[in-house]
Amino acid sequence: MSYILSEEEQMLRDSAQAFLAEKSPVSELRRLRDEGCKDGFRHAIWKDMADMGWNGIVIPEEYGGVDMGFTAAGLILQEMGRTLAATPFLASSVLCATALRYGGTEGQKSEHLPKIASGEKVYALAVDEKARHDASHIETRARKDGNGFRLSGQKRHVVCGNGADMLIVAARMDDDSIGLFLVDPETSGVERTLRRSVDSHAPANIHFDDVKLDGDALLSETEDGSALLDLVLDSGRACLAAEQLGIAEEAFSRTLDYIKEREQFGQKIGSFQSLQHRAAHLLTEVEMTQSLVIKALRQLDEAPSQAPLWIAAAKAKATRVSRLSSAEAIQMHGGVGMTDEYEIGFFYKRAQAAGEFLGDDAWGAGRVAELSGY
Amino acid sequence: MSDLESFRNDVRDWLEANCPDSMRKPMKSEKDICWGGKRFEFSSGDQKAWLERMAEKGWTCPSWPKEYGGGGLSKDEAQILKEEMERIKARPPLISFGIWMLGPALLKYGSEEQKRHYLPQITRGEIRWAQGYSEPGAGSDLAALRTKGDDKGDHWVVNGQKVWTSYADECDWIFALVRTEPDAPKHLGISFLLIDMEWDGVSTKPIKLISGKSPFCETFFDDVKVPKENIVHESGRGWDVAKYLLSHERANIAGGGSGAQMNPVAAAHKSGEVDENGRVADPILRGDIARLTIDALAFETTLQRIKDQADGGQGVGAKASMLKYYGTELNKRRHELNMSALGSDGLLWEGENPEDGDPARGWLRSRANSIEGGTSEIQLNILAKRVLELPGG
Ligand SMILES: Cc1cc2nc3c(=O)[nH]c(=O)nc-3n(C[C@H](O)[C@H](O)[C@H](O)COP(=O)(O)OP(=O)(O)OC[C@H]3O[C@@H](n4cnc5c(N)ncnc54)[C@H](O)[C@@H]3O)c2cc1C
Ligand SMILES: Cc1cc2nc3c(=O)[nH]c(=O)nc-3n(C[C@H](O)[C@H](O)[C@H](O)COP(=O)(O)OP(=O)(O)OC[C@H]3O[C@@H](n4cnc5c(N)ncnc54)[C@H](O)[C@@H]3O)c2cc1C
């Protein structure tokens, strides 16, 4: 595997950079927040992204996608991290697209994947039930009921959950195995509560009260729903780590610019060794993160059975480093870094939320220990 | 079959036939390292045969040109050789400052004659080199060095003192930084000289380390006559050579950061600090070890990524400082956790077996990683200045 980006990948990254700088700079996130947007993203931008082909980045061509793989998805998310673009990309185009691609029957794939790719519908994945990410803790029940199912339970902080048109819900079946179910949030018995989060996204708590589902709601191409869920979550983690890398890079780069400009004591504050050493340390940490992120993404594309260790490591490292980078950014900006008017605080907030989603650094460390056999 | 595949097969067959069984076992102590040199005593016939066979192929320095005793291998081929050696756990046939410091500097700055003369002696392990950089008054501020060479026409007369010279008492030659132009600015008055340690006026005095061993020395030059042809690069331009060499030294010391030989999990098994499922028993220690694993994976992949970039023509440059900084800090952490996992077993200094004190001695020795070859603070200074282009200082 190569750590170097192919020409095609570089072009994708460049076009993502240009697009996001124009359509979705940090000021756009601020606007969403100040408008009190309930969906947590701008539909027009989501449509534009579909036109660029991004929404179907991991979807096969026969279902309307471009099938460029997870590395490509990660590159887009890395750029989104840089501008803090709030979109359903991770939830819909990575997590749910992967669930359908690897778990859906032919019928499910041809019905749903084109809708994700075209941006017509937004999908969200509902797994967590506890405050901290724990995919092994699933108490939502899908009881067999004739040909269909009855779904009951409570999902917590479903990312993109408030604006989603369709949900994929992890639930325990009668034999205690895990199944993933397509659930229209408008079905009776589904209740969503918007949770405004610190990063100005719009997740939701979702309550399922004896929700009636058809038999074909279950993603049933595979017997092993638990393995499918693992793969789906891991694909999300690897791509989310790329977004975190983008956050870390951008917060660092803005800080560098600032300390090269700001003067105190008659000199640039970037000339003080205490700041220089911390900046150099950050540079090193960001480089380390970059290596793990590209490794995890490439493994996912090229050798998925080897990927889990790298993904856990990448997610853990990217969580720590994006938080460190944005925290140092505030500190080195001094008083202005604490203001809402200045954008650096948005990075710190998003770093906290992205770190929590799908498992933070402590989660990743536990997983690494387990996968390493200690 | 591609050329590389058939190369791999050839390498595999050759190693199978030529690497003695005893050279496929992990090194147990310092004695198992082959440093070469005139005074080196091989610890076994196998160790000697292994060096000679590998040197014959040029594989002690796989990517150096053949005409200088190297293997002439491409990057891909050298990587394959490395992988195949790792596969059978072959020990490095030769480790030396000649290979990872002086050689690269000579390849870049040496005259054709110097390359033909000195490089094959390095690849065959005939001459062991010491590094004469640091002085009592010139550590981090290396360019403040005061060892001087008086110009006597066809030679210099060198006087002064070096310190922290690793293994100087066991070395044959020393490459030394000497101030030959006393009136030039600090960085422009230095020359890079090659000095035979058997010449009159060179003497050494060992210094004991906190790890109880004595691998470094004070080195004294007392009216040592050094012929003019023993200069590498131009007079007064030794700083260029010194810096270039340092980047190789740093990359190499950093490589120690991926050292798999020191494994805190294995240590926990050894001291019995695991539960019935083979997990590290103390959950906080287990977490600390996992965080170390994550950073070690990050470091390993970064080494590879930087190598890939260098292949793609993007150059390593000041990134050596990044690797040196991160790799050595990581290595110190690994030793600390190793000691924690060993508990009181790690405190042993001497015992029945020669390797009994190794964990503690290795742990103590690791403190030097972030000092030798330029301290961590100096690496951060370099990164701040050269990579981040921060002002001042
Ligand atoms: C919430 C809040 C409330 C406040 N309330 C008040 C108030 O009521 N009244 C009031 O007068 N002020 C108040 N302040 C201002 C506060 O005292 C200043 O923000 C603080 O002194 C830092 O100055 P600065 O913001 O200009 O940052 P700068 O001085 O520009 O510092 C930027 C960065 O450079 C670093 N730096 C600067 N000089 C050096 C150096 N020599 N060596 C190493 N690093 C250096 C700093 O540590 C910092 O990380 C408040 C600030 C905040 C955030
Ligand atoms: C085990 C070992 C083997 C060695 N082998 C060799 C050898 O073979 N040949 C050889 O020539 N040398 C060798 N050295 C010497 C080594 O290169 C020096 O020790 C090193 O460069 C530091 O110099 P110093 O010891 O004089 O410390 P100093 O330079 O005095 O540093 C003391 C402390 O001050 C800090 N400091 C200094 N300047 C700055 C600055 N500008 N900014 C911030 N902090 C600063 C340092 O980081 C350090 O923490 C060896 C050292 C060790 C420990």
Image (cartoon, coloured by chain):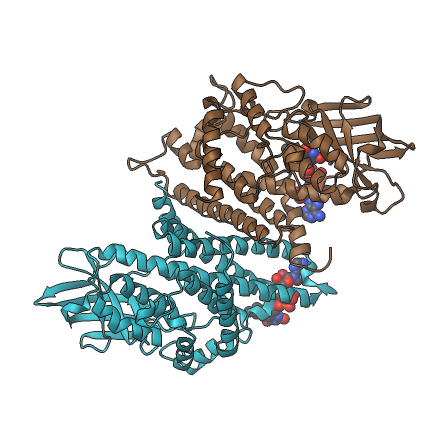
Chain colours: A cyan, B brown
Report the image quarter containing ligand 2: top right
> Which residue: 40% across, 64% down?
A68
Q: Residue furthest front?
A: B1
Where is residue A53? Give x, y as percent: 40, 73
The picture quadrant where one finds residue B282 is: top left
Left/right of residue B72 with respect to residue A45 in the rendered view: right
Where is residue B116? Give x, y as percent: 72, 33
> Which residue: 14% across, 71% down?
A214
Quadrant (top left, top right, bottom left, bottom right) of the N terminus of chain B: top left
> Which residue: 66% across, 44% down?
B247
Observer-nearest of A292 and A5: A5
Observer-nearest of B41 and A253: B41
Left/right of residue A347 with respect to residue B227 in the rendered view: left
* Residue B334 visible in the shown view: no
The picture quadrant where one finds residue B110 is: top right
Vertical side of B252 occupied by A307: above or below: below
Where is residue A277? Give x, y as percent: 63, 53
The picture quadrant where one finds residue A106 is: bottom left
